[in-house]
Image (cartoon, rainbow, N blue to C red):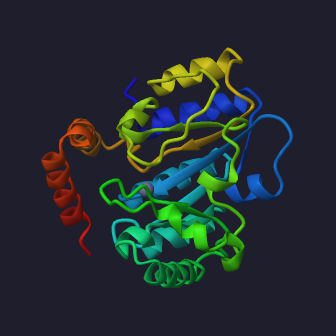
């Protein structure tokens, strides 16, 4: 079976449901965590907003609710999509990158953070935010929280700050693989569960065998699709991006080139 399609996403959700896991939104998990087996599905909508809507519809059909973090850039911030995701019963949060966008100017960053948060609050009473990795920027977006508190903005959680990853297993589909974390530059979480997966089928097998942790936060981006031309194009792109990112780690001129390409791509 092809991986990272809506079909494989459905297989993953069904495996959790059959094994007795319940799904919570991030906001619920922080404020009123379930006892027992719980999964939080977090979707960072970095791009391809319409794919997010398809995932949201599938989840609704399967009877689960999850959390969608939208960026302010146009590839993510598509009002029709946000509205429909909210209608389907999911949580919406803000995927912030204000410090990187303000090139480290903290005052500018906190002002745009607040304005963007208020923008998303037109659609949903946003209570959680999650940093975007901004892999080519020298600024870590989380540095906002050295001088400000989430509660200053009526917020209850930020996945990288509010979750104890010794107790909650964290898994991400970065680079089209569950072990692609080696390609990530900033959104890295270390944990001591000793589990390593590459394909979704391996995750499903582990759930079926009862070896999957009791609590998990799973980050799935919007690259999951059943449209084959898009699936092939995205796999090629991720393949080159992963290799470029690895090269860039040790080679400043490739890092520069990569940063220029990313800046061009995201230009509003
Ligand atoms: Zn992101």
**Which residue shows up at 30% across the image and 56% down it?**
136
| Residue 203 seen by the camera | yes
Q: Nearer the viewer, residue 165 or 236?
A: 165
| Residue 25 seen by the camera | no
Q: In which quarter of the image is the C terminus?
A: bottom left
Q: Where is residue 37, by image quadrant?
A: top right
**Which residue shows up at 17% across the image and 60% down it?**
260
- 243 to 27, vertically: above or below: above
Query: Is 35 displayed left or right of 243 in the figure?
Result: right
The spot of residue 188 in percent (x, y) is 49, 42
- 71 to 133, vertically: above or below: below
Q: Which of 164 and 14 is in front in this view?
A: 164
Q: Which residue lies furthest to the top in this view?
A: 209
Q: Which of 252 and 153 is in front in this view?
A: 252
Quadrant of picture, ligand 1: bottom left
- 144 to 251, vertically: above or below: below
Q: Which of 264 and 62 is in front in this view?
A: 264
The spot of residue 196 in percent (x, y) is 52, 22
């Amino acid at each position: 079976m092809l991986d990272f399609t809506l079909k494989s996403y459905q297989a993953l959700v069904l495996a959790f449901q059959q094994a007795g896991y319940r799904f919570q939104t991030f906001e619920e998990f922080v404020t009123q965590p379930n006892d027992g087996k719980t999964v939080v599905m977090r979707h960072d909508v970095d791009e391809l907003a319409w794919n997010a809507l398809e995932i949201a519809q599938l989840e609704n059909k399967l009877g689960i609710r999850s959390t969608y973090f939208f960026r302010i850039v146009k590839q993510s911030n598509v009002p029709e999509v946000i509205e429909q995701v909210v209608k389907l019963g999911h949580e919406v949060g803000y995927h912030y990158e204000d410090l990187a966008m303000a090139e480290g100017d903290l005052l500018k960053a906190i002002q745009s953070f607040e304005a963007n948060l208020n923008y998303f609050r037109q659609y949903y009473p946003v209570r959680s935010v999650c940093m975007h990795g901004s892999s080519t920027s020298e600024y870590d977006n989380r540095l906002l929280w050295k001088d400000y508190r989430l509660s200053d903005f009526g917020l209850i959680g930020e996945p990288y700050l509010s979750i104890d990853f010794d107790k909650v297993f964290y898994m991400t589909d970065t680079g089209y693989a569950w072990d692609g974390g080696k390609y990530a530059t900033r959104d890295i979480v270390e944990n001591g569960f000793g589990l390593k997966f590459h394909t979704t089928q391996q995750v499903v097998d582990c759930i079926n065998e009862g070896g999957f942790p009791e609590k998990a936060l799973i980050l799935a981006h919007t690259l999951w699709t059943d449209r084959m031309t898009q699936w092939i194009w995205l796999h090629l792109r991720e393949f080159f991006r992963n290799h470029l990112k690895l090269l860039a780690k040790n080679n400043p001129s490739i890092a520069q080139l990569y940063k220029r390409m990313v800046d061009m791509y995201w230009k509003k």
